[in-house]
Image (cartoon, rainbow, N blue to C red):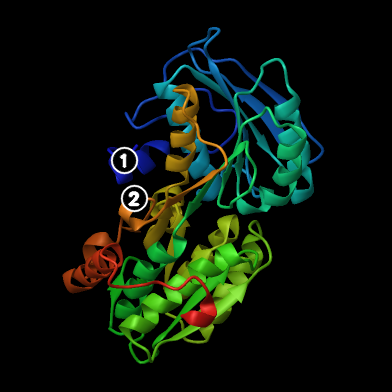
């Protein structure tokens, strides 16, 4: 996966989050082209679907995907995870099933369904999102012979492989970007800044140590660029409340923010709506949201891309090859291309070269160890 062109990969898989699609584009830019069998089972408020590849046999690897709340179609975190398992299906003798829990309370049930299944017998159960941690700790203990993956959190169990990211590093870069642009008169697409109001915002989903890493990195990047810039912060308490996201961002824009960065899943769609409403700018998260949320591309300056797809793909590949490691934590940061600042598809060419150079220099400084990025907002 590290050799894939990031933007072409994201474009090829944009829009593939809708459940029920049978031929989904991978990194080659085309569908798999094979006949696939799909079945969907409705849960109490979630769904489970089998998505089978074109190759079958006794050596076929079976993966069960349990997504975060908010579901597929978020153009962000869950869709990024799905892209990874789709690519693994393209590349290996692998089949996967996927579930979309409607609430955190359903996580354990879906985890146990996969772990207890004998037809098929799942080789790996991939749990997407830090909110899986509590239920997975219990499930893993009850199914000691089952291998699990968790993305975005560490679960201390001998049969769990944990994958986490240095979100604060990528968030620092978009903070640098926001600070430079809010300090100047800048217009592009449908947005513009007000140089007399040096003010930016951050909208988070649920307040947690994980989401605070985004806030901390963003704030640190802003302050390192210009300590006089204020950062407004709001936590919504949900990753799937676009109305609340829009209201929070509108309040920030009305209070002088030129640019709002979100780490809020589908709630962030409301941030993009507010940016268009007010003729300001936004920064997306997890995927290149100028592509996955293309109707807002005229206000999306950049996205702090988190390669959840890489984590899912690498785990699936390791399982296929018989070297999936459990009882360990894999961390992906800037140096590993696990996170990145990806400029908006429409607005990249409008961003001044000296600003892009400043972001590039900040990236290298972090990789070289010259800049240490805090993970707690109180340290930013």
**Identity of the residue drawn at 52% across and 87% down:** 255
Give the SS element for disc 1.
Answer: loop
Indicate which label's residue lies in the foreground, 2 or 1.
2
Whether residue 270 is visible to the viewer of this picture, yes or no, is: no
Question: Callout 2 environment at 10 Å: few (<14), some (14 to 19), or many (20+)?
Answer: some
Relative horizontal placement of residue 219, taking residue 51 as reference (left or right):
left
**Identity of the residue drawn at 34% across and 68% down:** 173
- Give the Cα separation between the discs numbered 2 and 1: 8 Å
Task: Say how many tags the image has.
Answer: 2
The picture places residue 326, in percent across and down from the top left corner, at 56, 37
Looking at the image, which residue sits at the far right?
A: 44
Which residue is identified by label 1?
2
Which residue is identified by label 2?
336
The picture places residue 160, in percent across and down from the top left corner, at 61, 39
Foreground: 242 or 89?
89
Quadrant of the frame with the N terminus: top left
Whether residue 365 is visible to the viewer of this picture, yes or no, is: yes
Foreground: 39 or 276?
39
**Identity of the residue drawn at 76% across and 31% down:** 42
Looking at the image, which residue sits at the far left?
A: 353
The picture places residue 315, in percent across and down from the top left corner, at 48, 34
Question: Callout 1 environment at 10 Å: few (<14), some (14 to 19), or many (20+)?
Answer: few
Quick check: marks 2 and 1 in contact, CB under 8 Å? yes
């Amino acid at each position: 996966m590290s050799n894939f062109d990031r933007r072409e990969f994201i474009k090829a898989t944009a829009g593939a989050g809708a459940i029920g699609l049978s031929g989904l584009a991978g990194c080659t830019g085309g569908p798999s082209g094979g006949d696939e069998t799909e079945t969907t089972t409705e849960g109490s408020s979630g769904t489970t679907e089998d998505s089978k590849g074109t190759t079958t046999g006794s050596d076929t690897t079976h993966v069960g995907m349990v997504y975060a709340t908010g579901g597929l179609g978020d153009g962000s975190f869950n869709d990024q995870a799905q892209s990874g398992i789709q690519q693994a299906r393209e590349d290996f003798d692998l089949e996967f099933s996927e579930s979309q829990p409607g609430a955190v309370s359903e996580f354990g049930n879906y985890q146990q369904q996969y772990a207890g299944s004998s037809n098929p017998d799942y080789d790996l159960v991939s749990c997407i999102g830090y909110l899986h941690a509590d239920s997975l700790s219990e499930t893993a203990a009850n199914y000691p012979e089952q291998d699990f993956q968790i993305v975005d959190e560490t679960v201390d169990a001998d049969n769990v492989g944990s994958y986490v990211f240095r979100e604060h590093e990528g968030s620092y870069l978009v903070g640098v970007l926001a600070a430079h642009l809010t300090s100047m008169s800048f217009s592009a697409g449908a947005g513009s800044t007000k140089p007399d109001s040096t003010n930016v915002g951050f909208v988070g989903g649920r307040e947690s140590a994980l989401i605070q890493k985004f806030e901390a990195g963003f704030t640190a990047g802003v302050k390192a660029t210009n300590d006089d810039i204020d950062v407004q912060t709001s936590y919504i308490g949900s990753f799937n409340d676009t109305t609340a996201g829009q209201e929070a961002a509108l309040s920030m824009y009305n209070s002088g923010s030129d640019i709002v960065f979100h780490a809020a899943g589908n709630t962030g769609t409301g941030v993009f709506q507010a940016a268009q409403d007010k003729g300001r700018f936004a920064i997306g998260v997890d995927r290149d949201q100028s592509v996955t949320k293309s109707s807002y591309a005229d206000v999306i300056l950049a996205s702090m891309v988190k390669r959840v797809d890489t984590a899912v793909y690498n785990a699936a590949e390791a399982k296929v090859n018989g070297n999936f490691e459990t009882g360990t934590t894999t961390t992906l940061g800037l140096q590993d291309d696990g996170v990145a600042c990806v400029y908006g598809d429409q607005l990249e060419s409008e961003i001044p070269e000296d600003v892009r150079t400043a972001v590039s220099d900040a990236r290298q400084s972090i990789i070289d160890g010259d800049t240490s990025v805090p993970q707690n907002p109180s340290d930013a």
